[in-house]
Amino acid sequence: MANKQLANTQDLVEIEEIKDNTVFLKNGGLRQVVMVSGVNTALMAEQEIEALSAGYINFLNGLDFQVQIIIHSRKVNIERYLSGLESRIKDEPSALLQSQIKEYQEFIGGFVRENSIMEKSFLVIVPFSPIMISGKDAISGISSLFPFLNKGDKTKKKAEDDTGIKEDLEQLVQRTTQIVEGLSVMGLEAIPLENQALVELFYNFYNPETTEREVENIEDIKKGR
């Protein structure tokens, strides 16, 4: 029985590289990611919710391209925060405050053991796929079949490719700007992710079991830092 070669993990990932605050896919597509602030509708009046819903509908109807909206949940690890409370207990001279901090530490630790604290991120994926011109594809195919037809002007081809990528990026940036401005009109804060944030984001996607986010301050949990 012939041995079957196992596929390389990287072959299963569609990302070619991340640069210029953009995700370059292996199929030639480009993606930018916008992180959006959340809204607690439980604290809003009915009229405010209706206005927000109407604004969201207008936002979607104003787009002439598809987008993908993702809610990314990530478990929060507060072990470092609990360790910080332990240090405060040792440094606190007042026995009463020591007791109160200890009770608070036990309460938070017990609550987290029974209820996982999840951090939710709201993301809008902005796509752009370059338009392939069939005539150029045909010429490229013929050149690959008959190498002697290729004049060897690799420098010119690279310059053309670089120009094409630059134009594609400009189109993508325009779309991303439209998304950010449209969400801002709704009163939502929208920020395009840069290279490092994109790398961390996709690492979290592909390694969900090993990427608990550590926090040092309870306010970080409330603010989603």
Image: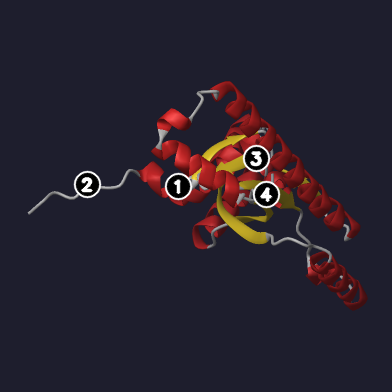
- Quadrant of the image for the N terminus? bottom left
Do callouts 4 and 1 mark residues in contact (Cβ within 8 Å)? no
Find the residue positioned furthest to the front: 149
Q: Which residue is mark 4?
A: 221
Question: Which three-letter amino acid code belongs to the residue tagged 2?
Answer: Gln
Q: Earlier in the sequence, mark 4 or mark 3?
A: 3
Q: Residues within 10 Å of mark 4 (few under 14, many from 20)?
A: some
Quadrant in the picture for the C terminus? top right
Tell me whether the residue at label 3 lies in contact with that at label 1, contact meaning CB atoms closer than 8 angstroms. Answer: no
- Find out whether the residues at labels 2 and 3 contact each other: C-beta distance under 8 Å: no
> What kind of residue is marked 1?
Val
Q: Closer to the observer: label 4 or label 2? A: 2
Left or right: 25 with respect to 122? Answer: left
- Decide which of tag 3 and tag 1 comes sooner along the chain: 1
Label 4 sits on what residue type?
Ile
The one nearer the camera, 93 or 115, is: 115
Whichever of labels 4 and 2 marks the residue nearer the N terminus, that label is 2
What residue did someone put label 1 on? 13
Give the side of residue 38 with respect to residue 204, left or right.
Answer: right
Q: Which residue is mark 3?
A: 22
